[in-house]
Amino acid sequence: MPRTWRFLPHDAALVGQVAADLRVSPLMAQVLIARGLQHEAPNFLNSRLSALHEPELLPGLPDAADRIVSAIKAGRRITIYGDYDVDGVTATALLWHCITLAGGKVDYYIPSRMEEGYGINCEALRQLHQDDPHRLVVSVDCGITSVAEALLARELGLELIITDHHQAGASLPEASCVVHPRLPGGSYPFGELCGVGVAFKLAWGICQRLGDGKKASPVMREFLIGAMGLAAIGTIADVVSLRGENRLLVKFGLKSLRERAAPGLKSLMKVAQLDESPSIEADDVAFGLAPRINAAGRLGQARLAVELLTTDKADRAAMLAVHLDELNKSRRSVELKIFKEARELISNHPQWNDAPAVVLAGDTWHPGVIGIVASRVVEHFSRPAILIGFNGQASTGQGSGRSHGRFDLHAALSACAVHLISFGGHQAAAGLKISKDRIDAFREDFCQYVAANYATGPRDSELEIDAEVRLADVTPRALKELEMLSPFGEDNPRPVFATTRVELAEPPRKMGEGERHLSLRVRQHNTTLRAVAFARADWAEPIAQLGRPFSISYAPVINRFGGHERAELQLIDWQPDPSAAPVAAAETVPF
């Protein structure tokens, strides 16, 4: 679907006033105004750790911190029950470090993605209770919908603390206590913390209690500063809003990663070729560190990712980092194979190609990878998609779904729940379990629900552009000022600009693994810049054959490769310029 470029409002007088008041460039002022940040700009541009909310404000946290400190002092075993994604793995490692440093007796349990699935399960609780009935179990990044599991823990006499950030169900679990930023009846000022953000706040509360009640000891304070590195990784990977507290955790956490990384993260940064970078940015985490951690969970080895983040042995850390790197390469290979098969399935069923949603299943599809492929299917076909994987001849499959635009995927699954064994998630992403013999009926009802409740409109294909600029305006100096808006991510994307009437300075070139990406050089007047379009190698031929100036939209970045700083464009979209005359072909010289 062609994207509509929507230029955000531009008021020259207001731009001048904001630029003068804040002593920033007109370009920065325009971006601030376009994003509605002009009034909070001083605090936004000059972030302070003191803006973090006190942990005591988080619903359920005071009770949870008291219980954990009591267990530490009593010498009881504390088991952290985590999730297998990056958010859950970093939350598990963060709380493990806190309790270990406090002298506690701590271990962790990460369920198998393929065998146990997401969240707390009853069999695991029974086993934990049998091994040590006096232990304290603390969930991170899961548990808010574990009503039956919490009831079992209570029946067993197993003390269970649930910390989570996901959407709660109709009833809350009757655990010993529940920590959640959006707990009904609570009034926490920022409800968008992810699992590791909640774990960081809990660790902060524990450190306060082990200090003077208000301040942590110097040792634990240093731990908290370092722990923000883990919080930053999990927050970026979970794609939560990078405003408010999340932005603070990521901003200071990225600095901590560079300065205070433990052996495991140092080794991971080395295999991701980030060890020589003068600074770590959110994109480095999103595309370098997080996928390698995530690959372990997707391929059933999440415990190795936690071990990497908790080990103090440099040789073991190096070995684990290399292993996670190999897992990530395997994950990419599996992902490409499943995506190819998904496209072939739709090609072989023409009626599916015209359906309002995509529901596909494969007997050999790895359940840990189909979520990533579902995102690619949504991007390719511009509609909600659910992919279901079966383990060989298994009659029950695991599915992952991704939404499109503003469609509420969780509501759709609720409407089709009669076909499902179980499901969970939120508006944009969800998981499910289903019997093989119910897939056709589920596909039919799901597509009917989408058709009745979702119609794509102009806003679904809109690309918001902060400003129209000349290529000459995109300089390293201007981009360094714009970096004051970072870290960039969900709800705080990189500034997006548009430039009209550019020409190719040289033919487009495909690059990267499988030649999936596109590199080109564009020129406007006397300025030539490199542009890169990720996963858009298919643009190479139409751009090369255009034969006339065109318009581009992009996010500008600073390329610091080789110690030199150059402005570079991350190409988002392009359009032929209807007012531009074709570029005359150069005359062929016969000698």
Image (cartoon, grey):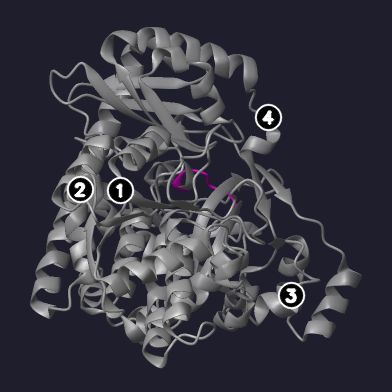
Lower sequence index among marks 3 and 2? 3
Magenta-span inclusion, residue 232: no
Res 457 label: 4
Compared with 298, 339 (above or below) is above
Closest to the observer: 291 or 441? 441
Quadrant location of the N terminus in the rendered image: top right
The magenta-colored residue range is 544-549
- The crowd level at tag 3 (other Cα within 10 Å; few <14, some 14-19, many 20+) is some
- Secondary structure state at the residue bearing disc 3: helix
Lower sequence index among marks 4 and 3? 3
Distance between mark 1 and mark 3 Cα atoms = 48 Å
Q: What percent of the width, then of the height, locates residue 582?
A: 60, 47
Distance between mark 4 and mark 3 Cα atoms = 32 Å
Under mark 3, the amino acid is Ala
- The crowd level at tag 1 (other Cα within 10 Å; few <14, some 14-19, many 20+) is many
- Secondary structure state at the residue bearing disc 1: loop
Lower sequence index among marks 1 and 3? 3
Q: What percent of the width, then of the height, locates residue 120?
A: 32, 42
The residue that mark 2 highlights is 128
Res 158 label: 1
Under mark 1, the amino acid is Leu
Distance between mark 4 and mark 1 Cα atoms = 51 Å
- Secondary structure state at the residue bearing disc 2: helix
